Image (cartoon, rainbow, N blue to C red):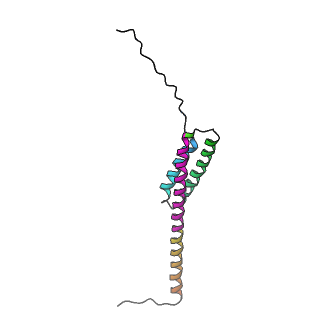
Amino acid sequence: MSDEQQPTVQYSANPQQTSGKAIASMILGICSLLMCIAYGLPGIICGFLAILFAKHANQRIASGLAPESSAGMAKAGKICGWIGLSLSMIVLLFLIAVFVLGLLGVVAAGAAGAAGAAPTLLP
């Protein structure tokens, strides 16, 4: 047995918490990407909120109230939010166009029937 003492190593790492707004921004951004196929509206709401939370997180990071390690999450949330918002708006506009064209088709068919066009009988 030796009388040598093993050196003790103490880690005093100060773990910084990630900004809650940055986390919310990233989660909402991912949700906006996933929700863009759900008639567009949930994706628009999640995308808008993701962009808003990313802006608030970046402001808190710039003022020193949130750690700079949160900047990556805020940026990811902002990018996903913009992409999800754009895709959701495209899906919503497409669905509105399909609805309007379908409605116009029904109106046109009704107008053709009211104009006295007799149906053609097949032999």
Q: Quadrant of residue 14?
A: top right
Residue furthest right as drawn: 63
Q: Residue at x 52, y 54 (%)?
A: 32
Q: Which residues are magenta?
A: 69-94
Q: Residue at x 54, y 69 (%)?
A: 96
Please indicate whether residue 4 sits to the left or right of residue 101 in the image. Answer: left
In the depicted structure, whether residue 7 falls above or below residue 47 = above
Front-lying residue, 81 or 38: 81
Q: Residue at x 52, y 82 (%)?
A: 108
Rendered location of residue 95, percent (x, y)? 51, 67
Rendered location of residue 123, percent (x, y)? 34, 91
In the depicted structure, whether residue 108 falls above or below residue 12 = below
Quadrant position of the N terminus in the picture: top left
Whether residue 93 appears in magenta in the rendering, the answer is: yes
Front-lying residue, 66 or 107: 66
Rendered location of residue 86, percent (x, y)? 54, 60
Dominant SS of magenta comes to helix
In the depicted structure, whether residue 119 falls above or below residue 40 = below
Whether residue 1 appears in magenta in the rendering, the answer is: no
| Label tally | 0
Front-lying residue, 121 or 71: 71
